[in-house]
Amino acid sequence: MVSAPGFAPPYRATIHLPAVNMLLARLLPIVLGMRLAAGPVAVAAAPGVEVDGDLPAANSAAKLRNSIPHPASSGAGRQPHWAFVRPERPAVPSVHSPARRSANPIDAFIVARLSGLEIAPSREAERATLIRRVTLDLTGLPPDPEEVRAYLTDATPGAFERVVDRLLASPHFGERMAQDWLDAARFADTNGYQVDRDRELWAWRDWVIGAFNRNLPFNRFTLEQLAGDLLPAATRDQRVATGFHRNHMINEEGGIIPEEFLAEYCADRVETTATVWMGLTFNCARCHDHKYDPFSQRDYYSLLAFFHNVTEKGVGDYAANIRRSTPPFLKVENPGLESILGARRTELDAAEKELARSHQSLLNGMADWEHLARAATPEWLGARLREATLKDKGLRLPVTGDWIDVPAPVGASTVSLVFPLPTSGLTALRLELDAIPQSASPPPQPAITALRLRRLAVAPAESAVIPLHAASLPDTAAVDDLALALDQKDETAWKVRITPGSPSAGWVLCHAPSESSSDTLELELVLAPGGSTTPWRCRLLTTALPADLLLPVDIRSLLEQTNTHRSAEEQTRLVDFRKSRTPEHQSLTRRVADLKSQVDAADLAIPVTLVMEEMETPRPTFILKRGAYDRPAESVSSATPGALPPFPAELPRNRLGLAQWLTDPAHPLTARVTVNRLWQTVFGTGLVRTTEDFGTQGDPPSHPELLDWLATEFVESGWDVKAFVRLLVTSATYRQDSRCSADQRARDPENRLLARGPRHRLPAEAIRDQALALSGLLVTSLGGPSVKPYHPPGLYEQVVAGSSASTYVQDHGSSLYRRTLYTYWKRSVPNPALLMFDMPFRESCAVRRARTSTPLQALNLLNDPTFVEAARGLAQRMMREGGSRPESRLDFGFRLATARHPQPEELEVLVRGYHRSVADFRADPRAAADLLSVGESVADPALDPSELAACTTAAGLLLNLDEVITRE
Amino acid sequence: MTPEPFTRLHETRRHFLGRTSAGLGIAALASLLGPPPSLAASTAKATGSHFAPRARRVIWLTQAGAPSQLDLFDHKPKLKARFREELPESVRGGQRLTGMTSGQKSFPVAPSLFEFRPHGESGTWLSETLPHTAGVADELCVIRSMHTEAINHDPAMTFLQTGHPIAGRPALGAWLSYGLGSENHNLPTFVVMISRPGGPTNAQPLHERMWGAGFLPSEHQGVRFSPGRDPVLFLSNPPGITDARRRAMLDDLGTLNRMKFEDYQDPEIQTRISQYELAYRMQAAVPDLTDFSNEPKSILDLYGPEAGKPGTFAANCLLARRLAERDVRFIQLYHRGWDQHDNLPSGIRSQCRDTDQPSAALIQDLRQRGLLDDTLVIWGGEFGRTVFSQGTLSSDNFGRDHHPRCFSLWMAGGGIRGGQVFGETDDYSYNIVRDPVHVHDLNATILHCLGLDHERLTYRHLGRDFRLTDIHGTVVKPILT
């Protein structure tokens, strides 16, 4: 839409870009751009927006209303812009048009304007066209042959209405209606900024589908999405609905300032709310007062204040699991996973109670224990070695008494010490290292060797490994050093200084096997390379003193004090020590820790959905100078714009009140904007073409009185969406033929007057869904997490963060054939095929899609495996269900795709092509096999490959027909 | 693709046209011989311009991640003596820092480790990391006084490309597609190619929105060319479908669509027919474009050892020249990996190994073919980097944080006076002291070179006329020829 104020005002040239053609699209900015040097000023000087330049308005009242000057530019006696005045229900025009069935009031308004221009409306479309049109419009899927047959043969009155009622009752109605709402709500499966990780809001998407299917009245639909959490005793479902305003992008980039992005999220909510419910370009007032519409910057931030009190952070937590990165969120109802979580929690509760009991009993027994511990002294007995070998060298080491001589240098090697399980029991091992006494020569320099305790096991089975724990005694190495001997890492070891005459020792706690077939144990020591260059010796000692009586020096010195002299902290240390040396308590502690992590995992396994949640104390909101987050000016409180009806005093000043204010019958915009959007869904173009802008710069309605009649009708019906859609599609206006004479085209190229049925390309989702439906591959289950169907390789790798490869991991099986609204949408790299067919990026609110026609679309439909496989599926149906002759098969396929029989000359083209293809593929069976191999579903082996390949070619042609990707 | 099948393809097409002239209507034939009607009109050359253009196309060599101006272009000899000195507060002036350095206790000056020398007759100072670029110094206009608004990658790159830090506005290439249309009937108007760093550096993500059409009709969206079987998505026929089979199917499709048009008279049907023919021509034009087999060894050598490796910056530069030869309007390369928060010296060397020779080769190659006069080439990133070290500063290693207050880039070719340096920063390359050039000014200047007045290239959306430069931007006249 480009206005040309240089012409005599009030005048507006209206050019619909895709409809005219790309020539105009390309030339317009150049031709008209020059005349628009100072856009804002020039436009403001010509505010008398007039209906379509070359089409005088039929109704002078409408003309008057549309000529109301801009509030900002007119002086005394200013009247508000039409859209800001509550609609009054106009009388339905009485039309004398005996040739026309005036099916409902819509037609009266349409025909009244047409007859003023002496344009005749079109006849009703053929039934086949009509059932395909309405089925695609209301469900996004094509009718199946049985549905078509039933309608074509139903001669009783109300046949079409019965089709409509059947479609409105279909669960696919909710899916179709949800598609447009997902655009408006900027729904996606990722966070959008920078790293663009996944997020979960599909439960909200499913809520939307369900709400349309159960025909939730639009005012309720509004209330629950804007403020379901604030309803008294809000249900989980109502809270899920508030995901609407968590669909905005969220930044997880390191180094950002949270306040900056919090401001962005709130601005996004304002923009979306204003666009979706009020058709206002409110974002214009973020940095300064609105240039054209009567909204101030204060209005903007007052509206923002409603959305500024959410318990959210300005930045996602990139370190956290995606399910927890961006609170507030809510778990999605999932009885299976919830019961698993419940079971884990019950186990954890029980274990924690048991641990508490164990703790208590340890506390109770402290006095007794102290008494015992003070008196206890470990008795270290020689291990009575049976064998000491250098394992890898097969070398038996000499044993003298308890001492084993280790030659030097040995290099890296494993020492095996085999000894009997002491009859008195075993609680700890002590290893002493010493220099070999050399009475004659002077004592050698201290040497250092490094070793690891590889393992203690029952010999010779080597299966029952006995866990070792580092510990220490007054005369031994520090616990940390010993821990290095046990960590089982090649690069760390216990470094022992071997000083002549002063043995180094380390000891470790172990738990002897409770039941063993063997009474022999084997300890393996690993000597690190580069050890001592002089020989040394070592011995192994054991004790059976209970571990809680083997006291390190610090614990012993604590025990020396009487308990009245100990601080609480010291007492706790004693208790903790005892816990650490009580195996039963230790295993309980481990069990609790293990169950905690199981509970956490079970908790994370449950999908979540982002929701709104109000802060207890609202955040203060300020007007931001030039919209900059760090330049606050005056503070404001939540309020609705002054130019719109006042906010009733009895409503709460929060989102709940805001939703009620929006859906108050006195609100001039909500009903108009909503019925206009529904009109757009069904007719392809709104009565106000600028669905997103009802302000003074937006297009005026083509039929102002009809718009007001529809708005009031919608409110009076109780905001009944299904009834309203039914009203639209059962009108004669909707049911008109979409053929167009040259005269019609010349007078009304864009069909704003609706003297014919609208004809336009299907939306992206319907193009793919239809192909899947025709192929028989479509999986019609509703809802659930988004799926990843076929996708060109390599697209993520080029652009994703970091140097590591990140890729699109395609799903398999039924996920390949789900309806397109369930396709995973990554904001930074959106599904390219859908983007080609004008799906919005879903980064911000979009209530109107472009409808382009490009060569990339042609390449997609011709070559994308999705469509090649679907063509084969359709071909299989043609061969199985379409009879045995090529003519009947092609006729059947054509009927599936268009709902009508082909004309003889059309069939002739198909049949000729088919015969050519069959001959071609018979001569090149390899090519046929290649073509039939596309896609993960398997070609029916019972069908002749050449015939199937030829049918696939024909089916591919059908899927590319202009008629097939168009609803006409 | 070897040249042979392409020749065969031509024959097929001739054969097809011969057959069509007998079998189809004159109108259909005309639409195949010429460009499709809807595109033909927009191709009237330069009718889109507001005044005589100096450049007809743009090659934007976007260095994603923000290359350090201090180590490439902005020579600061006095810094050597200030190694590890604290950056004076008077210089920093309370400038916003990212969350990555705002907690740093000190801001020690990290002079560049690289030697700078004057090059060419113009004596343009360049770092030793750019030996090949130095060879074309007299073609370049180095702007040392660029500045931008955003301090984080995502908003800054979005700002550089679309003139707005928040997603949703059209990219520069989309504006040009919209304003000037196409001069090639078989290739997209706005082509995007991306390369990953050769070294192990921090590569920031890119988003499709950076070459998106925003609120413009989506046909103006940049088309991403990828290395591999299908440079353009869905370009190849499915297995088992030869060109002849495709052609026969498209003939039947066209026949049926024309029957539909006769019946319904909807011009959208004609557009669709044209688009299918354009798609068919693209199937030949793109493989021809990406087939380097007719490039002599001397040319491959000019672009360096990676020129023959699809998907590298070098291969993309050579492709850019081939696209320029075919009159593609806007060619945008992205090379990622310039985000040197740490290990900057080795990171920069590695990035320069990827980009220096191919960038210089592109300039030389365009020059020797006479294409540089009407091709505008731009080289640079989304912001600059700090003079102070991020993390530990040692004598041979350090990192630099984001710095929106100043950065450097160069322009060359159509409309730009080469062999000059424009703008100046202070001794720390921290603040601009002369001739600041904002991103809006850069975009205004680019549009100016293409004969477009940035204040008059507008699109009506949400009730107002939007511009690439919003309400800002001044053409930087001194750098123009």
Image (cartoon, rainbow, N blue to C red):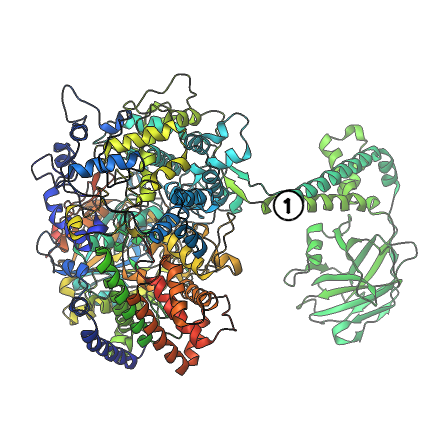
- The residue that mark 1 highlights is A336
Res. B20 image quadrant: bottom left
Q: What is the crowding at mark 1: few (fewer than 14 residues within 10 Å), some, or many (at least 20)? A: few
In the image shown, does A610 or B144 lie closer to the viewer? A610
The percent position of residue B267, horizontal first and vertical second, equals: 21, 56
Nearer the observer, A275 or A806: A275
Name the secondary structure under disc 1: helix
Which residue is located at x 29 percent, y 30 percent?
Answer: A709
The structure residue drawn at horizontal position 84% and vertical position 55%, both measured from the top left corner, is: A512
Quadrant housing the N terminus of chain A: top left
In the rendered picture of this protein, how many numbered marks are placed on residues?
1
Q: Residue furthest top?
A: A649
Residue B393 location (% of width, % of height):
41, 52
> Along the line of sight, which residue is nearer the eye, A396 or A761?
A761
- What chain does mark 1 sit on? A
- Say above or below: A30 vs A108: below
- Between residue A636 and residue A234, name the one nearer to us: A234
Residue A199 horizontal/vertical position (percent):
48, 46
The three-letter amino acid code for the residue at tag 1 is Gly
Image coordinates of residue B180 in percent, x first then y, are 16, 55
Residue A468 left/right relative to B469: right
Residue most extreme to the left: A8
Could one spot residue B202 in this view of the protein? no
In the picture provided, is A317 more to the left or to the right than A675? right
Q: Is residue B480 above or below residue A585?
A: below
Residue A573 seen in render: yes
